[in-house]
Amino acid sequence: MLGLSHFVNSEALTIVANTGDDFDYLGLRVCPDIDTLVYTLSGLDNPDTGWGRAGESGSFMEAIEAFGEDTWFFLGDKDLAMHVARTRRLAAGERLSSITRDVCRRLGVAARILPMSDDPVSTVVETIESRLPFQHYFVRDRCQPVVRRFEYDGAETAAASAELLDALAVEGLRAVIVAPSNPFVSIDPILAVPGIRGALRMCRAPVVAVTPIVGGDSIKGPTAKMMRELDVEVSPVAIALHYEDFVDGFVLDTADAELTSRVKALGIDALTTNTMMDSLDDRVMLARDVLEFCDQIPRPSGGGRASR
Amino acid sequence: MLGLSHFVNSEALTIVANTGDDFDYLGLRVCPDIDTLVYTLSGLDNPDTGWGRAGESGSFMEAIEAFGEDTWFFLGDKDLAMHVARTRRLAAGERLSSITRDVCRRLGVAARILPMSDDPVSTVVETIESRLPFQHYFVRDRCQPVVRRFEYDGAETAAASAELLDALAVEGLRAVIVAPSNPFVSIDPILAVPGIRGALRMCRAPVVAVTPIVGGDSIKGPTAKMMRELDVEVSPVAIALHYEDFVDGFVLDTADAELTSRVKALGIDALTTNTMMDSLDDRVMLARDVLEFCDQIPRPSGGGRASR
């Protein structure tokens, strides 16, 4: 995403944010996925942590401990401004999409960040012990509980972002790229909102996913751990299969070159390249490779993909 | 109040907080009077400013400016914890009294701080130009507009704190002291809540007010400016007259000794002493003088004061 923003004209880039991570914490509406996108694209991010803002301080968090409030999710003093401003505006009746657009404008983010829906959707992790809201599983319990399945509370009745559906239908859309993300907790929440999966199937631009699994493990986060716990093969092939109904192409890492034929056997075009993003250069090169791959994929004829 | 807390057993001290100053700011419920009381009595206060906490930082406030939010009322990073915790608890349905009691317990405040009411009351300053919520007048506009009158929105339908009414009726109450505060925006909002003025009139303990006007000027704040704008004599006598229906005694500063007879002519006992509180010693001495004065005032026979 950062690579793409450096490679293509940022104004032409639309990023769909997963809002299944969103939760109420200390009475504030926290949207971790939107926040990370905004901070990364505005250059306010903390590259050392991968979340939050650079040069952050923790005076608020230290003080609120004395009030007996939760402190398991760290909110830096500067980061707090995002949550307080958003919470105030949501309470005043503004849509999350509209707030996000305005925040991007104010912080100088040229790309368009679209929440998948303005209605609340909550990813719930069903572990062998209990049902946990996503951030409780991910941050508070550090992904330690063994997962059984995932639910997306509210998704069934949520309205898909109209801007997102329009973006998928727009004439001249070059490509849809599914980032190397966790399929269960980052991509599936988006796909769970009625209309989005169908719009991806019907989309006339090539849809390409990039593997989050390389050499039998996650690039980052608990994807591989979850796949093991769900008894799914920890392999890019399983990811490709997961998205099989709507992707035209799939990008594997060179470390998994021998799996290319198995992806192709699913009827999905495959690209093998370096998907590991250590530096900004890596990011820009992967973005270039993926876009070139997209450009080579023959346009699916109307509804062709939908019939899979 | 700080003097009293050093002079009497803190557990025996009940302080009534004016909540007419309270307002919603950045979506947070801010209660400046309660906060100053809590910070002062817990030792977290900033003696240099008279508000907020010591050793405060402003990262949040600096960050939220970029979001286009209001910044005219400074909320320090630590102070923010109070407002966030309170707002969360109010939204969860807890009473302001109950939250305040718990916060006092957590921060080690032994005295009891009672909001005058759990229902919202808003002091409105009617200036020659417009109607301003109190903090807009006081902080944003730095008391510059010329005042005409004051209103206490919501007071008519607010329920007086039951704990406060009980405290005024309790057997063995030693004294009720009206602090050297601004009568219009600090004391009148409390008196505007139905039942409180009547309970003060009926109270069997002596009720004594301390002058906020010394030598023709306010000890601090805009009291004298307001009195001039309202065409009221800037004098302790005017303050005594303001409270005439419920006070038994009035404390003037030695600088105004010549006005003692005018206060007594109102049928109010008078004490002349040093009321200027520069040091903690000054505070403790004033508290001692005022309490001794209270102890010498004959108990009003049942309902005697109410008949004035």
Image (cartoon, coloured by chain):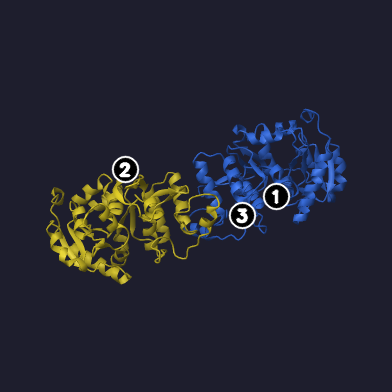
Chain colours: A blue, B yellow
In this rendering, which labeled residue sits more in front, label 2 or label 1? 2
The residue pinned by badge 1 equals: A222
Q: Position of residue A266 (x, y in %)?
A: 83, 36
Q: Is residue A111 above or below residue B45?
A: above
Viewer-closest of B136 and A256: B136
Residue B45 visible somewhere in the drawing: yes
In this rendering, position of residue A124 left or right of residue B65: right
Query: What residue appears at the point 46 percent right and 58 percent down from the top-left corner?
Result: B79
Circle 1: is it few (<14), some (14-19), or many (20+) Cα within 10 Å?
some
Secondary structure under the numbered disc 3 in the rendered image: loop
The lab-note entry on whether marks 2 and 1 share a chain reads no
Secondary structure under the numbered disc 1 in the rendered image: loop
Instruction: Give the residue type that dot 3 points to.
Output: Gly
In this rendering, position of residue B285 left or right of residue B71: left
Instruction: Give the residue type that dot 1 points to.
Output: Pro
The lab-note entry on whether marks 3 and 1 share a chain reads yes
The residue pinned by badge 2 equals: B158
Q: Position of residue A117 (x, y in %)?
A: 61, 37
Label 2, label 1: how many angstroms apart (C-alpha)?
A: 53 Å
- The subunit carrying tag 1 is A
Q: Position of residue A22 (x, y in %)?
A: 59, 44
Q: Quadrant of residue B1?
A: bottom left
Q: Is residue B199 above or below residue A190?
A: below
In this rendering, position of residue A169 left or right of residue B217: right
Query: What residue appears at the point 71 percent right and 42 percent down from the top-left corner?
Result: A12
Viewer-closest of A49 and A173: A173
Viewer-closest of B44 and B278: B278
The residue pinned by badge 3 equals: A52
In this rendering, position of residue A23 left or right of residue B208: right
